[in-house]
Amino acid sequence: MITWEHFIYFAIAAVLLWTVGAWAAWKDKKAVAYTSTIIGIAVFFCYILLMWISLERPPLRTMGETRLWYSFFLPLAGIIVYSRWKYKWILTFSTVLALVFICVNLFKPEIHSKTLMPALQSPWFAPHVIVYMFAYAVFGVATLMAIYLLFVSNRRSSSTLSMEGSGVALDNLVYVGLAFMTFGMLFGALWAKEAWGHYWSWDPKETWAAITWFAYLIYIHYRQLPKHKPRLALWLLIISFVLLQMCWWGINYLPSAQATSVHTYST
């Protein structure tokens, strides 16, 4: 039976494969980059699938389990971006970010039990969280691109975002992320109706989800302005990702959420 103690072996194998893929991308060895990264993703997903079987429920209840999905989706989003726009650095960035979340899970493991409270036994629970985690991963990759354009590529003029196609790639990522986030919110509303009798209650978690959704919507609309400033757009994207972190895990540290939120399941 697979347990949390086995995670380190799958994680090491996956990270090594992702590292080889990132190196191959820099060396223009596309076949190696694709093969190694995809095998690493498959290895990591095998652990998630085995944990699902072992726990007899989707591994989505605790923060550690959601970090597991986030670590899986990051290189998946990275390889999608690499295949579409051929950014050599994206696999390196997605691997490093995935490694950060893997290390958090290794040094601060959550309690993983088979217990699943009644509110989480809805058929909408798994699709809601999985879709959200994919959206979060896409936004994570978009944020990495924004940071790269702001700080690593600073020798170029600020107009490069719109002139060289990077802005188009970034916008497409945000469109995809926001679409999945919207589906996640809809699934969450259906879940809430089934579990608590109402679609939306302005619970602290729901409030921050709405704030995050509007933040990315503001970015999209700002980018459509004829005289928008590319660097300000990048900063809007980074701020939106900070708000997303607040919605994902920062909410757990707010006294109001601890007292009233129906979305606190780890205690």
Image (tube, rainbow, N blue to C red):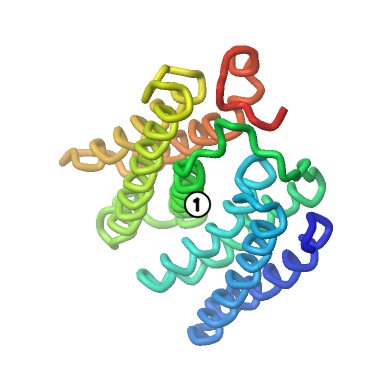
Instruction: Judge from the rendering whether residue 256 lies leftward or rightward of residue 106; answer left or right.
Output: left
Nearest the camera: 15 or 191? Answer: 191
Q: Is residue 51 above or below residue 146?
A: below
At a point 59% along the width and 32% down the height, the residue shown is 118
Nearest the camera: 230 or 200? Answer: 200
Residue 154 is at least partly visible in this image: no
> What's the residue type where badge 1 is placed?
Ala
Q: Residue furthest left?
A: 226
At a point 40% along the width and 41% down the height, the residue shown is 184
The picture places residue 70, in percent across and down from the top left corner, at 57, 51
Q: Is residue 142 above or below residue 192?
A: below
Disc 1: which residue: 137
Residue 209 is at least partly visible in this image: yes
The picture places residue 245, in percent across and down from the top left corner, at 55, 35
Nearest the camera: 90 or 183? Answer: 183
Number of numbered discs: 1
Instruction: Judge from the rendering whether residue 212 lies leftward or rightward of residue 11; answer left or right.
Output: left
At a point 30% along the width and 49% down the height, the residue shown is 175
